[in-house]
Image (cartoon, grey):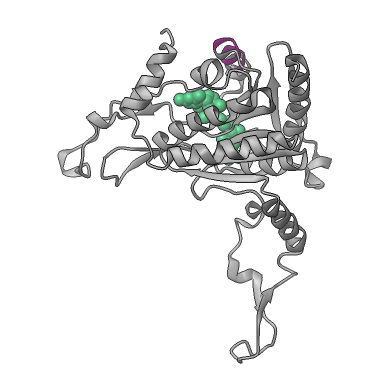
């Protein structure tokens, strides 16, 4: 089926996806962030991360979610900052976050201890147990430096509607800095939704029997992003499949359809150790060896390295 026209996607967004009340304020913040860093000679990357939530009822009890822990987005944010970028981190509320991601599986109370054996005494203080968290000082130091230099602007979304409107606002904000902007669209975005006009108000009742859902297609937001909202930017989309045999073909098809700069293609089960970066002219496999894994090398380090060099060349070609 033919892609809907750009203007119709814009119209659909306004009509069928509730506009978050803070979108104007967030757009101003993102514009100021982009202009400030670009003026200081920095590039700016917008990272999307985590899965979107699609409500089934307007007073929502149930919703449909997309799989994503947010680890790829959160770790990539750190590597982009180390490569000299300022980062707008558009992420799902409570998905993994840069720096704190390293401690996400831990029970905070297990990482603390009293300074004296008699913990209840009034002069005993609570400190970090360095045996449990040996690298906490290093991570804390970097986190604080990044915070002080305001290199990371976190923006949260929950629902698909919030994601779509905030991404549009981000694209318009970043269009002010032209080719210095990169979009790194690692979020797992729902392809289906129920329009507000067709959504039941109250909780769907199981007493009515088995549930049959009919959902509409979400407009492919890459289309207006590349052609209309931020036409000079360097845009990377992601392609996730569970069947490795169709992955490359899907990545190539996405490049042909949207005419953006690269697709990072990955398979669900192997995504931590293998991805393919596909551009209109090239395809590069990035693979972690056993040795890399022993040394805690992360694949996001390689992905970011590959893409920041490609972004350099892109900017040079654009004469920026
Ligand atoms: O978070 P982790 O657990 O670390 O996992 C990382 C990841 C597997 C989620 C990530 O590497 C990844 O592959 N993300 C994209 C997954 C996905 O949902 O792909 P897709 O085929 O639905 O979408 C392809 C591209 O189109 C995406 O870049 C998306 O931003 C974009 N899209 C999707 C839907 C839509 N309506 N409009 C879009 O523009």
| Residue 1 seen | yes
235 relative to 146, above or below: above
213 relative to 30, above or below: above
Q: Which residue is nearer to you in this view: 145 or 79?
A: 145
Left or right of residue 6: residue 268: right
Percent x, y of residue 262: 66, 20
Which residue is found at the position 18% from the left and 38% from the top?
209
Which residue is found at the position 68% from the left and 88% from the top?
117
Q: Which residue is nearer to you in this view: 3 or 244?
A: 3
Which residue is found at the position 70% from the left and 31% from the top?
274
Residue sitting farthest toward the left = 208
- Which region of the structure is painted magenta? 251-257
Left or right of residue 103: residue 20: left
Q: Quadrant of the C terminus?
A: top right
Q: Number of marks in the image?
A: 0
- The image quadrant where one finds ligand 1 is top right
260 relative to 81, above or below: above
Which residue is found at the position 42% from the left and 37% from the top?
162
Left or right of residue 205: residue 229: right
Is residue 209 found inside the magenta-colored segment of the image? no
Percent x, y of residue 69: 55, 43
Q: Main secondary structure of the magenta part?
A: helix
Residue 198 figure quarter: top left
Q: Quadrant of the N terminus?
A: top left
Percent x, y of residue 59: 26, 45
Percent x, y of residue 103: 64, 57
Q: Which residue is nearer to you in this view: 148 or 155?
A: 148
Left or right of residue 228: residue 33: right
| Residue 48 seen | no
Is residue 255 found inside the magenta-colored segment of the image? yes
């Amino acid at each position: 089926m033919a892609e809907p026209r750009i203007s119709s996607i814009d119209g659909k967004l306004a009509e069928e996806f509730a506009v978050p009340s803070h979108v104007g304020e967030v757009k101003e913040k993102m514009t100021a962030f982009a202009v400030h860093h670009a003026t200081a000679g920095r590039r700016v990357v917008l990272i999307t991360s985590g899965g979107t939530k699609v409500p089934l009822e307007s007073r929502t009890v149930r919703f449909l979610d997309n799989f994503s822990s947010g680890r790829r987005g959160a770790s990539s944010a750190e590597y982009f900052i180390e490569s000299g970028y300022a980062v707008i981190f558009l992420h799902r509320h409570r998905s993994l976050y840069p720096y704190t991601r390293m401690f996400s599986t831990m029970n905070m109370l297990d990482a603390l201890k009293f300074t004296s054996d008699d913990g209840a005494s009034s002069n005993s203080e609570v400190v970090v147990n360095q045996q449990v968290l040996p690298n906490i000082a290093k991570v804390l130091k970097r986190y604080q430096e990044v915070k002080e230099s305001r290199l990371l602007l976190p923006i949260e979304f929950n629902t698909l509607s919030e994601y779509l409107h905030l991404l549009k606002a981000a694209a318009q904000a970043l269009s002010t800095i032209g080719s210095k902007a990169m979009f790194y669209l690692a979020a797992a975005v729902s392809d289906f939704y129920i329009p507000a006009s067709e959504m039941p108000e109250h909780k769907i009742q199981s007493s009515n029997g088995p549930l049959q859902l009919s959902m509409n297609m979400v407009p492919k937001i890459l289309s207006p992003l590349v052609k209309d909202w931020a036409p000079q930017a360097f845009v990377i989309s992601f392609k996730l499949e569970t069947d490795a045999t169709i992955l490359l073909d899907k990545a190539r098809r996405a490049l042909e359809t949207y005419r953006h700069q690269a697709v990072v293609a990955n398979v669900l089960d192997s995504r931590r150790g293998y991805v393919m970066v596909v551009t209109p002219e090239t395809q590069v496999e990035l693979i972690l060896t056993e040795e890399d894994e022993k040394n805690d090398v992360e694949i996001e380090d390689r992905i970011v390295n590959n893409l920041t060099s490609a972004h350099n060349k892109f900017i040079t070609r654009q004469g920026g």
